[in-house]
Image (cartoon, rainbow, N blue to C red):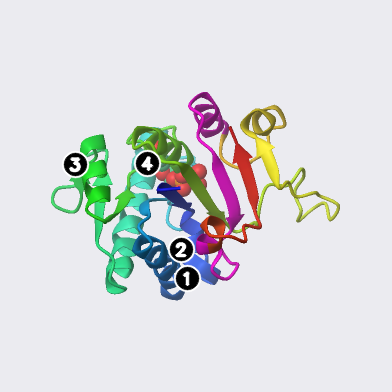
Amino acid sequence: MQRILLKLSGEALAGPRKTGFDEETVRKVALQVKALAEDGMQIGIVIGGGNFWRGRTSENIDRTKADQIGMLATVMNCIYVSEIFRSVGLETSILTPFECGSFTKLFSKDRAIRYFAQGQVVFFAGGTGHPYFSTDTGVVLRAIEVEADVILLAKSIDGVYDDDPNENPAAKKYDEVTLDELIARNLQVVDMTASILARDNKVPMWVFGLNEENSIVNALKGSFRGTKVLV
Ligand code: UDP
């Protein structure tokens, strides 16, 4: 594993508060990413927007506009997390698929690869830049474009189950599952658009709990306890 993309949900940034930012939570992520970067790993970050807004949040405004708000929420999240990363000594850049003035730089594959080579953590903000998509699809798309080895999905749940473990105590956690099985069984790891894009382009995804101590580092160096979604 040399180049990885880490996907964090918006809610993960909010910690127990569910909305906005929880600095302690983000700082723990920053320190783990720093440990991996110091080990020579190239790390890209994609963050959702659910701690502020989702396209589905309002039924009364046009969906395209609602989704634009959602994409901007992901940009705010990336600016925040990028600054916390910098406060622990990492170098970062934020790339977006649309112009945000001087706040971010426009995404291109070449630019991303150049920043990775310089040792920067690269944030892919703004999702795909299009409405009716999600940051799940965004992370798979960027993983394909920048030729990442794996996507790490750090979630509030510690892996992929055959049923909702909150409702069915007998739900079984998979150690491994293929993307074909994921799609056939409609297992809700990422949305269907993202699952199909990952399958068609052979992108593996490792799912694990963000709340477990040091889980991001552990996922890559030894004691992985989540689910590997294989191609
Ligand atoms: N969004 C979008 N296009 C993208 C990525 C995100 O329109 O390529 C919008 C969409 O409104 C989404 C919100 O940004 O609800 C936040 O993204 P996230 O992936 O967290 O959304 P979720 O899957 O939780 O709705």
Q: Are marks 1 and 2 in contact (CB under 8 Å)?
A: yes
Identify the secondary structure beneath mark 1. helix
Residue bearing mark 1: 25
Q: Are marks 4 and 2 in contact (CB under 8 Å)?
A: no
> Disc 4 beta carbon < 8 A from ligand 1?
yes
Q: Residue 99: which disc? A: 3
The outermost residue toward the right is 170
The mark nearer the N terminus, 4 or 1, is 1
As for residue 200 lying within the magenta part, the answer is yes
Residue bearing mark 2: 13
Q: Are marks 4 and 1 in contact (CB under 8 Å)?
A: no
Identify the secondary structure beneath mark 4. loop
Q: Residues within 10 Å of mark 2 (few under 14, many from 20)?
A: many
Residue 199 location (% of width, % of height): 55, 28
Residue 101 location (% of width, % of height): 14, 48
Left or right position of 164 against 225: right
The foreground one among 79 and 195 is: 195
Measure how far apart labels 3 and 1 are at the Cα level: 29 Å
Depicted 180 relative to depicted 45: above or below: above
Q: Are marks 3 and 2 in contact (CB under 8 Å)?
A: no
Residue drawn where x is 76% and y is 56% of the image: 166
The foreground one among 199 and 119 is: 119
Which residues make up the magenta segment? 192-217
